[in-house]
Amino acid sequence: MGCGASIPKKCKVGGKGKKRRSVIQEVAVFVPTIRIPVDSDVAHPLKGLVSKELVDRLSKFRDRVVALSEDIYCADVSDVSELQHALEEYLPVVLGLTMKESRLESSVEFRWRTLDDDQECCLSSAWYEVLSVIHMMAMLALFEANLILIPKNGQVGGERKVSEDAKKDVVDSLLRASGCLDYCVHRILVQIPAQVKKSFPSYFQEGMLEAISIQALAQCVEIQLGLASECEKATLSVKRRLACELVSYFSQAHYCLSGCDTSDSFGKKLLLFLKWKCMEAKAVAYYYHGLVLDKGNEASSHISAVCCLSAADDLVADSKRACLSFCLANPITRVPPPWGIMRNMHKKIPDAACKRFQMYGYLFEQDNNSALQSLPDLPEFALSLRPEGYELPSTDSIWDNVDSQPQIQSLKEHLDDEDEVETK
């Protein structure tokens, strides 16, 4: 398992079954490994229980998702949108299998695999299929956000130039991903028996899904903070609030993993990502907190400001090492250029820390109160973002009046079915 946006980009150099060339990618938005559906026998388990029209519709929509999924790592934004639309078409049809009155929830074995390591998970559960579809929709939203922030035609390792409108599109994608994952945790997992969950891959752990949902919210705030830093009208207080919120979100995401199995490559990569981003967020939060405190007139305010800026300077250095650890962890990713809020912070924070110490260093010698010379706590603010509301679509009308009773077939239909079996 690995990081979808950061795993080597797979581009075909030949026909089916040929080797693929890999290029180490950058990560702007962390994307867990993308899982795609594998061809599954939908028709025969349902034969005689539902109409042939329903079976054909279910197979057709799922086969389309399978076909569009294969080369998703080589996709652009329009390709991702097409696949999202295919999933949205398929979901109302497969939802019919979860209806209690259909009594078909465990009738079909659904197969999914991860694109980066080809690990398969096959379960006879329609709710597992629904969970997999919504999870894939969330991963595609994260993948889309990463595509927007790192354009294919951009210079490798160069400065990312992304328009304000594009950044707003990224925020929309991140909120959508967070909403899908939040729905998975609170509305889908509860439908699945514990015995079935024991066979789930590690990235379907409740804490893991929660962590990625909150991480998506954190990266929304990260975008907002970057926009605020470029806005002359945004006050220091507004920037500090956003930075402190960013710390809270990344800390919450990290906490969600405390009870999860993170021993695989994906779990380790996610932990390193959250550690790195949390350090960056704390550096920015202490920077802005220090600037706000420095506006006070008392010596204690200046001492606290110097402590905050010194801590921010240390955190910037630590975050650079944390970034390198993340990039070197499997799957290896390219060290990204500073972007967004961090684009100028690598210079601003050390400069501010040095300047304030030169101005107020004498206060530390005059004041022997160690309590005043300790690092103040960051202020806490109510979190402003919530996952975007997601609701399942209505079940496709083709399921109306389906009671899963044996369907009477004509002799011709029966013989046609037998011919299909022999030709496969």
Image (cartoon, helix red, strand yellow):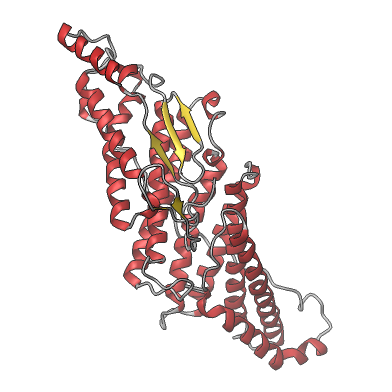
Quadrant assignment for the C terminus: top left
Residue 79 horizontal side relative to residue 26, left or right: left
Question: Is 42 placed above or below 149 here?
Answer: above
* Residue drawn at 34 percent across, 67 percent down: 166
Closer to us: 31 or 399: 31
- Give the percent coordinates (x, y) of residue 151: 38, 66
Determine the image quadrant of residue 92: top left
**Residue 28 percent coordinates (x, y):** 47, 63
Identity of the residue drawn at 51% across and 73% down: 337
In this view, the residue in front, 55 or 279, is: 55
Q: Nearer the viewer, residue 374 or 146?
A: 146
Side of 382 relative to 125 (left or right): right
Quadrant location of the N terminus? Answer: top right
Q: Is residue 410 left or right of residue 196?
A: left
Asked if 156 appears above or below 137 in the picture, the reply is below
Q: Residue at position x 72%, y 73% from top?
A: 375
Can the viewer see residue 138 in this picture?
yes
Residue 254 shows up from this direction: no
Q: In which quarter of the image is residue 188?
A: top left
The answer to which quarter of the image holds residue 137 is top left
Q: Residue furthest right?
A: 368
Q: Where is residue 225 in the image (x, y as percent from the top left)?
A: 47, 71
Q: Position of residue 345 (x, y in %)?
A: 56, 78
In the depicted structure, whether residue 87 falls above or below residue 371: above
